[in-house]
Every structure is written in structure tokens, then in C-alpha cells.
Amino acid sequence: MGISYKKLWMLLLERDIKKSTFRQELNLASGTWTKLNKGEDVSLSILLRICDYLNCDIGDICEAVRTDKN
């Protein structure tokens, strides 16, 4: 299983929040920002900070996705 943050990016677009503003206001480290952009795992505490900032539930910003393993 993997994780997709597509819902997060769509939510930012819907709310007209620029990615740069979002990153600055949440004070996200560059490593964390890279992980979010690459669809890699980030800590639950980061996801909860994002949810608090956007006033949403964790399911509104990410979802588990199946990955094919050959």
C-alpha cells in the first residue's frame, strides 16, 4: 500500500491556497515537503497539523492506494 496526497493538492486549489504560502504557514521542512510532493510517507503529527490548518479530517487530504508489486 502507498499513500496519495492528491486530495490535499485538490483542496489547496479549491481554497485558492498557494503551495508556497501553505508550506510557509505550516513551517514544513524541505524534506517533509519533498515527501509530500513525491507521495511518500510523512509522520502522523504532520498530517494532523495540516488537518488543523485546513480545518478538515485526515481522509480529506490523503488516501491509501494499492501499489502493484511485480
Image: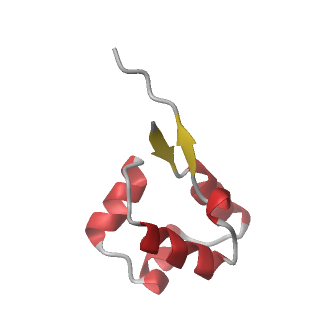
Q: Residue at x 59, y 59 (%)?
A: 8
Query: Outermost residue, right direction?
Result: 14
* Tally of numbered discs: 0
Q: Quadrant of residue 2?
A: top left
Q: Residue at x 71, y 70 (%)?
A: 15
Q: Residue at x 41, y 57 (%)?
A: 36
Please say if 66 is above or below 60.
above
Is 14 or 40 nearer to us in this picture?
40
Q: Could you tell me residue 62's position as x and y percent?
A: 57, 54
Q: Quadrant of the N terminus?
A: top left
Query: Outermost residue, top direction?
Result: 70
Q: Could you tell me residue 44's position as x and y percent?
A: 45, 67
Is 30 or 13 nearer to us in this picture?
30
Please say if 20 is above or below 14.
below
Q: Is residue 24 left or right of residue 61?
A: left
Q: Is residue 42 left or right of residue 47?
A: left
Q: Could you tell me residue 64's position as x and y percent?
A: 54, 43
Q: Could you tell me residue 52's position as x and y percent?
A: 61, 80
Q: Quadrant of the C terminus?
A: top left
Is 39 or 64 nearer to us in this picture?
64
Q: Residue at x 68, y 70 (%)?
A: 16
